[in-house]
Amino acid sequence: MSEIKVSLVNVSKTFDGKHPNDRVGAVNDVSFDVYDGEFFAMLGPSGCGKTTTLRLIAGFEQPTSGMILINDIPMQGIPPYQRPVNTVFQDYVLFPHMTILQNVMFGLEMAHVPKKEAERRAREALELVQLPNVANRKPRELSGGQQQRVAVARAIVNRPSVLLLDEPLGALDLKLRRDMQVELKTMQEEIGITFIYVTHDQEEALTMADRIAVMQGGRVLQIGTPSEIYETPATRFVADFIGETNFLSGKLTDVNGSYGTFALDDDVHIPVLLHEPLAVGDTATLAIRPERITLTDYEDQTPYPELVSVFAQVQQVQYIGTDTRYQVRVGEQSLRVRVQNTDFQKANRFKERQYVRLLWNKANARLLLE
Ligand SMILES: Nc1ncnc2c1ncn2[C@@H]1O[C@H](COP(=O)(O)OP(=O)(O)O)[C@@H](O)[C@H]1O
Ligand SMILES: [Mg+2]
């Protein structure tokens, strides 16, 4: 087990408003550990408390309650510049009149590192972000992606234990963003610095992070690896926020250990696995990803012992090249199904209004309380 680098213990932050009633609970009882060398992402919609959490770790804000430790040392009373962290903000600013090298050296010179040593370290940092040849250029001569990398070089030049990144790719267009995601991740693995990375982009978190904390309303809802978060979302919010999910509402009509029967209505009964303490009569939501459902012919009588088989009617067919997306009706409810167009699974095999069978593995459908 690698060592814990950053620890948040029951951290809350309330901002006082102009009036006593205006108090905003920005961060609410947040606890997590980030390990040495880890790429840890905080993911959630705008306003869920990501930036505030990052600012608390950096020391720009003080917690209303709870404790933050970095390298096992409580951070209370320690000002930002004495914490072993650096921050890269979304709206990072490079000094336009300075060269790239001067921009990267700036912080070291402020900290009275001798000029020679500062330059050596700055060149090293530029090499780490794969920009050794732009040292003498001005920021405006660099592309957006290159400027972003200079911002990272500037933040790692004094070798922080932890780099805090607040939506650092937010200003870039989608294509560049995707390239930078791969680059930043590779860079992080090479440098070995712990990253705490804030984003509202679920794809970004899934592709980059070792672990993700999903936040909503100042709280952490779930922490896990990308596949844990995607495959076994703990709540409806997490299932909905990460990727695309179908939600079917219904009621449990039978419970037998970890097996149950979930009824959408009088006619549609679906065998389910139970992960939550649920009893007969409870209402719940069945969550299933569009790509985990397979379509087959209505007449297909092959017994599929491992699979759930549900009758449905195709409502809409959308061909998008790699996949075909179907909207199908099950009882009174609607589901999206995504089928990959392989040779084996012929594109557009099913037409609108056609009756079909949906098949899925029980393990891929999760019954959620909320
Ligand atoms: N300095 C502040 N004063 C008052 N309210 C704030 C302040 N900073 C953030 N908030 C509020 O705290 C909540 C969380 O904000 P923030 O941490 O910026 O969210 P995120 O980064 O996830 O978008 C929001 O409701 C926001 O308006
Ligand atoms: Mg923010």
Image (cartoon, rainbow, N blue to C red):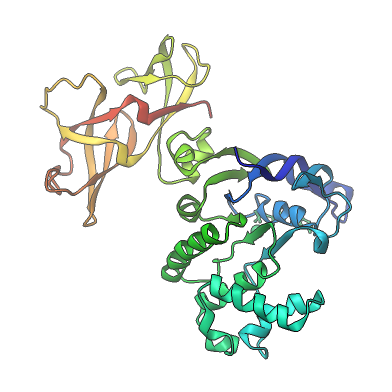
Of 91 and 211, the residue lying toward us: 211
- The residue at the point 66 percent across, 41 percent down is 33
Q: Is residue 282 left or right of residue 1?
A: left
Q: Position of residue 72 (x, y in %)?
A: 77, 44
Residue farthest toward the top in the current orientation of the protein: 256
- Residue 336 seen anywhere in this rendered image of the structure: no
In this picture, residue 68 sits left or right of residue 37: right
Taking depth in this image into account, of 317 and 256 the one nearest to the observer is 256
At 39% from the left and 14% from the top, the residue drawn is: 259
Decide if residue 188 is on the left or right side of residue 162.
left
Residue at 21% in and 57% down? 321
Tell me: residue 279, above or below residue 249. Answer: above
Relative to residue 270, is residue 106 drawn left or right?
right
Image x and y of residue 196, in percent: 63, 54
Quadrant position of residue 364: top left
- Specify whether residue 365 is in view: yes
How far across and how far down the image is residue 334, in percent?
Answer: 33, 37
Quadrant hosting residue 90: bottom right
Check the image and report above or below for 145 versus 246: below
The number of discs equals: 0
Q: Quadrant of ligand 1?
A: bottom right
Tell which of 119 and 130 is nearer to you.
119
Q: What percent of the width, then of the height, locates residue 74?
A: 82, 45
Image quarter in which the N terminus is found: top right
The residue depicted at 61 percent of the width and 72 percent of the height is 153
